[in-house]
């Protein structure tokens, strides 16, 4: 949690504390007014009720002001948390997109190391060593020789191909 968020929560706690203190003070004030002796003149009672009324109006206005401040603080805190959640979900989305792109690249690499005819990985030697045709497409040696014998065409682009068009590919390292 950020320091701004902690500060906002502290402000909210302070306002709630002030609200509780106001309620306790109001309750004590009302209790004290009721304990006043009842043998006072009517005029004095009216004056005391007017004072009590003005005090109650002040308590209400103070309570309303505190509630308004509390509402603003709470809405601010909620909006900060919503922004943080949206930022987090945006980061998760970006990471997911990055992973999807990486998976696509890995899948295409998998295609690059497999013979498109038999789908087995190429080798750097033996009967399934990697070879290419004039068109540039890569195959396993035995697979392309069988395919040329059948159709005299590249299985991918369908260009004319002969056994003499088969070229060995030399590499120090071949992904296996």
Image: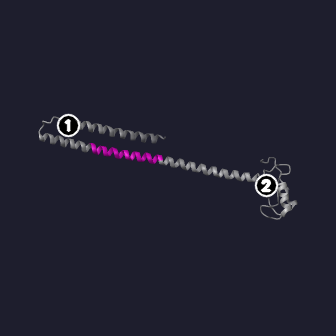
Q: Mark 2 points at which residue?
A: 118
Please identify the residue farthest to the right as the structure is shown. Answer: 164
At 82% from the left edge and 63% from the top edge, which residue is drawn?
153
Magenta segment, prevailing SS (helix, strand or loop): helix
Between 147 and 167, the residue placed more toward the observer is: 147
Q: Which mark is residue 131?
A: none
Query: How many marks overall?
Result: 2
Point 57% across, 50% down: residue:
93
Q: In this view, does 143 lie to the left or right of 1?
A: right
- State the image quarter where residue 116 is shown: bottom right
Dot 1 lies on which element? Answer: helix
Q: How many other residues sit within 10 Å of disc 2, few (<14), some (14-19) or many (≥20)?
A: few
Whole-percent x and y of residue 7? 43, 40
**132 relative to 26, above or below:** below
Q: Is residue 66 left or right of 39 when viewed as pictured?
A: right
Residue 4 position, x and y percent, is: 45, 42
102 and 42: which one is in front?
A: 42
Q: Which label's residue is closer to the chain start, 1 or 2? A: 1
**Figure quadrant of residue 167:** bottom right
Q: Tell me residue 164's x, y (percent).
A: 88, 60
* 158 within the magenta span: no
Q: Nearer the viewer, residue 162 or 80?
A: 162
Q: Does the magenta stretch include residue 74?
A: yes
Element at label 2: loop
What segment is highlighted magenta in the picture?
Answer: 59-81
From mark 1 to mark 2, how far is it between C-alphas? 98 Å
Residue at horizontal 37 percent and vertical 39 percent from the top: 14
Which quarter of the picture shows residue 163? bottom right
- Kindly identify which numbered label has been placed on residue 34: 1
């Amino acid at each position: 949690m950020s320091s701004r968020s902690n500060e906002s929560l502290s402000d909210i706690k302070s306002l709630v504390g002030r609200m509780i203190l106001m309620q306790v003070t109001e309750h004590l004030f009302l209790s004290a007014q009721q304990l006043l002796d009842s043998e006072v003149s009517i005029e004095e009672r009216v004056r005391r009720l007017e004072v009590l009324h003005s005090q109650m109006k002040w308590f209400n206005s103070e309570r309303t002001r505190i509630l308004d401040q509390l509402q603003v603080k709470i809405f601010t805190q909620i909006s900060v948390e919503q922004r943080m959640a949206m930022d987090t979900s945006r980061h998760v989305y970006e990471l997911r997109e990055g992973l999807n792109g990486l998976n696509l690249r890995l899948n295409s690499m998998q295609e690059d190391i497999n013979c498109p005819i038999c789908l087995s990985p190429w080798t750097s030697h033996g009967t399934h060593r990697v070879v290419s045709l004039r068109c540039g497409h890569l195959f396993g040696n035995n697979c392309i020789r069988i395919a040329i014998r059948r159709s005299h065409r590249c299985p991918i682009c369908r260009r004319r191909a002969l056994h003499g068009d088969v070229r060995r590919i030399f590499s120090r390292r071949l992904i296996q």
